[in-house]
Image (tube, grey):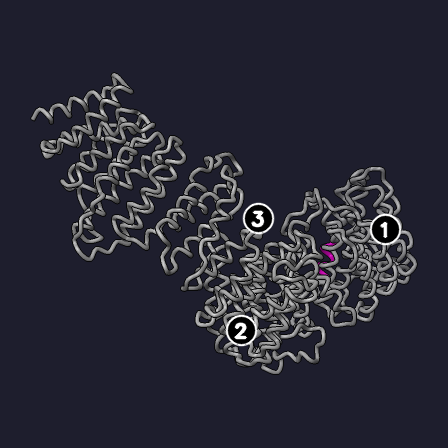
Amino acid sequence: PVLLLSPWAVAALQRFSESALEYLANLDQAPDPTVRKDTFAADLSSAYDILFHHWLQSREAKLRLAVVEALGPMSHLLPGDKLEEQLPKLLPGVLALYKKHAEAFHVSKSLGQILEAAVSVGSRTLEVQLDTLLATLHAQICVPVESSSPLVQSNQKEVLRCFTVLACCSPDRLLAFLLPKLDTNNERLRVGSLQILRHVINSAAAQMEANKPFILSSMRLPLLDTNNKVKRAVVQVISAMAHHGYLEQPGGEAMIEYIVQQCALPPEQELDPGSADAPADSVRAVSVRTLYLVSTTVDRMSDVLWPHLLQFLTPVRFTGALTPLCRSLVHLALKRQEAGADAFLIQFDAHVNLPSPYAITTRLLAVSCNPYLGDGRGVASLRLLHVLHPNIHPLLGQYWESAVPLLLKHLDEHTEETLSPKEWEARLLMFLQDTLAVVSDNTWICQLSLEMCKQLPCYNGAPREKNFLYKCIGATLRAASSREVVRKHLRELLETARYQEEAEHEGLACCFGICADSHLEDTLAQLEDFVRSDMSRKSIGIFNIFKDRSESEADRVRSALVLCYGHVASQAPRELLLAKVESDILRNMFQVFSTKDPTLKQCLVQGLCMVSQAIHTTLPRLPPQEFIRAEPPDSLRTPIRNTAMLTCACLVSLEPALEEQAQADVVHGCLHSVMALPPEPQEEGADCQELLYLDTMRALENLLTSLLRRNMTPQGLQVMVEHLSPWIKSPRAHERARALTLSASLLRYFLEHLRVSALVPFHNLGLLVGLFSPRCADLWPASRQEAVDCVHSLLYLQLAYEGFSRDHQDDVAEQLPPLKDGLVHPDPATLFHSCHSIAQIIAKRLPPDQLISLLLTMFEGLGDPDKNCSRAATVMINCLLQERGSALLEKAQVWGQAGLLLEVRVGAQAGDRAVVLLEVRVGQVWAR
């Protein structure tokens, strides 16, 4: 009949067969428990013959798929002998459909059901068909899976289900077929084979049990594959192995190491170029998840991973895996602690591949200095160090229980952007120092210092960690009581340092400085012996010792040694330093004073700065001036000016005080070196240059305040302003701006640190106000703002000298800051109106005895090359005469000076309205 040729009829057979199978599977709940499989045998056998022999060969694709879908569940209802008889034709018939249909899901699903039915009846035909089945199914697995095609993914699941059936009935035949394919170099074949292997390890665990060694050995070549898809498949196979006891077998260690290697992959190299893989599916991400899950959820792996994972902490190639390693180890350690002390304490002698407690401590402490690198390895490392304390040293428990949580809390309160590296390193060094004090065992401390020195080369590519480890070595040697050990390590550090790496100079020098705190004699002796040793070819002279080296290399070594001396002086005990500073430290440092090498210059002035900060006795002072003079006047390329001025600031603070002329020379040289520089660049990418400029300006400010600090009187302030005066009046706007910025800072410093013990006059107030107030109209807006700040500070200084307290708020003086907004506008009318207001405020607060000096100074300002400032001077003089002119009737010398200046000014700028008005105002006062 026509109806029987419809796919609907075939679908009805399929649904009937599926319903019958479900009924038979749940007979205990069925209404008629007497129903058996043979009840349907006769009818379904007839239907099978029609479907297989006639309709399966149909040219209509939909009908063929409907038939093959029905054959799957029908095969379970056929009599056993009938199925066995049909299998030699049924299996090839179904397999042939793979070539006819692109969508193979229905074929694979039916094939899986047929295979299950064959196995259930103990078919021998499968053995004959097995090779063909394996080859065809393997090809299906190796077809690339499109993530957007659910049917393709479902097909793979059904094919893997077929492999499960075959693995259960013929495990040896399946592995003999599958494992050799792991040796192929074809990516698809290898990935497909690994997927099948992972699946059968999980789904046919009992059948694979006897073949564990064979399977492990077959992974040798896949472990070497660099393809990311293969790597991901290998990791998934290893994860399956972990759940089923493979990694406990010989060869399992290699699988664990492979996982750790993938966890150590650098993030930027995880994905192949052009790969569409999401970051969450990258090899590293999959490996990290696998390691953690295996460590935390597979109980049988606890004995495999602990303490085995510890051996991956110290090798450099596993640095990228430190965070996941530490997290897994913390979980394993806590589980061991719950099991008791015997299970947790590690017998390091019995595990020769494990790092020692000293190596673990060194490694975890060193990487913690850069705590946010590698997914937060600082927190992970410190947590592991915390939990391992019984294995590190039995006395550390109580101290680490309180100290480590505080370190972790500090990290939790900060981010990579807000954490101060200097402060964090100081905290870690204090933690190390206190740890050494708690242990208080010289043998243990010496062993730790030895391990630290051994690990130092491991950080050649990580300057921050290496420099911190240098500091740790210094702290450990400082705590050591064995002078022989200290000398030995210091000597080795000098011989093995990478002097061509400038970043390493600071670390080496810090190490020597910290060590000198307890071992000054030995530290200085090792520095001296180093330059006289065979390494120096026994040349004469402490710094002229490198004749067999290139001059550049020699300068690098000299730079490091100069820094070492500086840090030694900085850290050495004060009571011992004075006896050594001239004979052992400065004598050697000054021998390279004539160097032309910029790096060596920088190290020398930095070292001298540290020496000067460390001592309080007479020294040959101010050699850094020579470096300042040697710098190019038209550019700022290096931090030499900055460091040299910081050194000068330290040196001028020492007793006895510099003579007046020497002080003037220092200020003049430093001001000229900075003020005369061209304007700082404004273009993009000039951030480093701008930062260098700001640091240099801060160093100059620090020097000037150091000099002012020695003479906190109106006369001392006047001296400093006189040095700045030529720059305040400079025709170049950027020089005026720099001078006014420094002046404002000096006045603020003077006001903040002024201590008035008796009421004394601020005798030069008028001179200073007269110098700064016309600059409120400077061509540069920033200069105007600074000038207002200067006048504001001067008015408060006058109030301080009158006896007012530091926190006094004066209503008149506080009218100045709001006027700064009016000075931003370039409109002349607005600008000079603000200047008039400023003059009114000055007139209200200026003592009568300062009025003449103020006016005389402003009269000089009438000849200022900046027309804005000269006009502002006329406006301010005009205002002052209007407000306070009556007090000047008997001061004839003022008018004589004013007439002379006005004559010059009017002659130079005939018709200037402001000058004419001023002349009229003077005439009015004179007429009185």
Q: Quadrant of residue 757?
A: bottom left
Magenta span: predominant SS is helix
Viewer-side label of 1, 2: 2
Could you give the CA–CA distance between mark 3 and mark 1, rounded to whole angstroms? Answer: 73 Å
On the image, the x and y values in percent for residue 585 come to 52, 64
Residue indicated by mark 2: 519
Amino acid carrying mark 2 in the image: His
Badge 3 density bin: few <14, some 14–19, many ≥20, Cα 10 Å: some
Residue shown at 81% from the left, 51% from the top: 71
Q: Does residue 438 lie above or below 410 as drawn?
A: below
Residue indicated by mark 3: 598
Residue shown at 66% from the left, 54% from the top: 553
- Upstream in the sequence, badge 2 or badge 3? 2
Could you give the CA–CA distance between mark 1 and mark 2, rounded to whole angstroms? Answer: 77 Å
Tell which of 349 and 510 is nearer to you.
Answer: 510
Label 1 SS: helix
The answer to whether one can see residue 924 in this image is yes
The answer to whether residue 22 is magenta is yes
On the image, the x and y values in percent for residue 643 come to 48, 51
Say the numbered circle drawn on residue 611. Answer: none
Q: Does residue 151 lie above or below 338 as drawn?
A: above
Label 2 SS: loop
Q: Residue furthest bottom?
A: 342
The answer to whether residue 681 is magenta is no
Q: Quadrant where the N terminus lies?
A: top right
Tell which of 830 and 60 is nearer to you.
Answer: 830
- Highlighted magenta segment, given as a residue range: 18-25
Label 3 SS: helix
On the image, the x and y values in percent for residue 568 come to 52, 65
Residue indicated by mark 1: 136
